[in-house]
Image (tube, grey):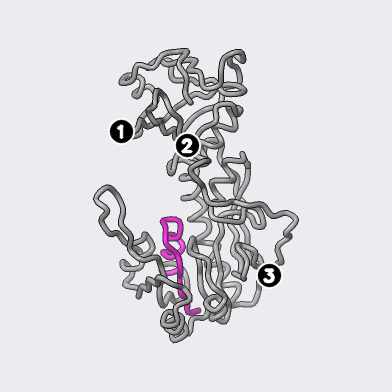
């Protein structure tokens, strides 16, 4: 099939690579976000998908507006059989209705669970034990189209959002190729989503990032895993922002102490903070303006004391 691929971030790259290297389908063009400034110098950089597309010498289109008449005409002129969408924008109906086989989206959850922009993050924040990937046909709703194929996976005990994202991206890359093969062969029966089982995975906002030490240790660790490595859960110590990337929930703690109280702060014995229930052992952390490091290394450079409070 003639494929137009649409995507932007790292998560989308394995699918594009797999379509080019390991499928019989022909990627005729790639649609991605416009180049944007990044970093302290605000230099202009292409998206991860654009960088990948250029290595394969694929034509790249970077529209500002997906409803622009010239853009739509360009897409129609390419006569695609199918769109493959991975981590891209919401498509208007005038666009997703162009291909014969429709627009096929790869979503990082077992739909209808975790519809929205951050399914991986929310699955971890909620402490899910399983997740997966789904291919479905895009319709006018957000992640509401008919399901084509799904693959479920177990979430590893200490897995972070970054690690899970990399794993699901590779699994999804294979599922997309299987989906296209079976669509062309006519061996897929689309399944309507059961809206009674749906849940939301909205965009991660700044309010979510700050650790509430009144919550249980386990819930705090789920939050840390779900936001690691970016944007990362954070807390404050003497007006210094600390980002936490890895932590472990401890069952026992002095329940009389205020949540956020430092129970242990020693380079050899570790950093332990009181939670609403239990305690959190901090493993990997980053002080504002510094690099990511172990809690032990941080404590060699910061004179934290037991009884002081994170907030």
* Labelled disc at residue 180: none
First of labels 2, 1 by sequence position: 2
**Residue that numbered label 1 is attached to:** 290
**Residue that numbered label 2 is attached to:** 233
Assign a secondary structure to mark 2. strand
Q: Label 1 neighbourhood size at 10 Å, few (<14), some (14-19), many (20+)?
A: few
Where residue 186 sits in the image (x, y, percent)?
A: 64, 77
Please count the marks in the image: 3
**Which mark is nearer the camera, 2 or 3?**
2
Which residue is at a point 51% across and 47% down the rendered structure image? 204
**Residue that numbered label 3 is attached to:** 190
Which residue is at a point 41% across and 64% down the rendered structure image? 17
Where residue 27 sits in the image (x, y, percent)?
A: 43, 74
Q: Which residues are magenta?
A: 1-20
Confirm whether the magenta stretch covers residue 44: no
Residues under numbered marks 3 and 1 in contact, where contact means CB atoms less than 8 Å apart: no
Confirm whether the magenta stretch covers residue 9: yes
Q: Nearer the viewer, residue 120 or 304?
A: 304
Q: Vertical placement of 115 versus 301: above or below?
A: below
Q: Label 3 neighbourhood size at 10 Å, few (<14), some (14-19), many (20+)?
A: some
First of labels 2, 3 by sequence position: 3
Q: Quadrant of residue 126?
A: top right
Assign a secondary structure to mark 3. loop
Which residue is at a point 59% across and 30% down the rendered structure image? 218
């Amino acid at each position: 099939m003639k494929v137009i691929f649409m995507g932007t971030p790292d998560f989308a790259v394995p699918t594009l690579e797999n379509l080019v290297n390991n499928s019989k389908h022909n990627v005729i063009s790639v649609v991605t976000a416009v180049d944007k400034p990044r970093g302290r110098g605000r230099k202009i950089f292409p998206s991860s998908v654009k960088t990948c597309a250029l290595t394969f010498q694929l034509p790249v289109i970077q529209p500002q507006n997906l409803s622009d008449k010239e853009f739509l005409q360009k897409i129609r002129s390419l006569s695609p059989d199918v769109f493959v969408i991975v981590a891209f924008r919401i498509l208007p109906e005038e666009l997703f209705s162009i291909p014969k086989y429709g627009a096929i989206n790869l979503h990082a959850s077992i739909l209808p669970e975790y519809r929205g922009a951050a399914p991986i993050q929310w699955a971890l924040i909620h402490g899910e034990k399983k997740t997966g990937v789904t291919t479905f046909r895009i319709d006018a709703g957000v992640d509401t189209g008919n399901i084509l194929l799904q693959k479920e996976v177990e979430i590893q005990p200490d897995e972070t959002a970054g690690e899970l994202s990399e794993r699901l991206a590779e699994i999804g890359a294979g599922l997309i190729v299987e989906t296209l093969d079976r669509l062309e062969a006519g061996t897929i029966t689309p399944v309507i989503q059961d809206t009674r089982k749906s849940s939301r995975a909205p965009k991660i906002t700044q309010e979510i990032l700050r650790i509430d030490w009144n919550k249980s240790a386990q819930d705090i660790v789920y939050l840390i895993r779900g936001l690691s490595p970016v944007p990362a859960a954070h807390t404050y110590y003497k007006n210094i922002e600390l980002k936490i990337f890895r932590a472990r929930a401890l069952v026992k703690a002095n329940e009389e102490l205020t949540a956020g109280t430092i129970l242990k702060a020693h380079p050899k014995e570790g950093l332990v903070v009181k939670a609403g229930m239990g305690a959190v052992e901090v493993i990997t952390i980053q002080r504002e303006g510094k690099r990511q490091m172990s809690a032990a290394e941080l404590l060699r450079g910061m004179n934290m004391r037991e009884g002081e409070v994170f907030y």
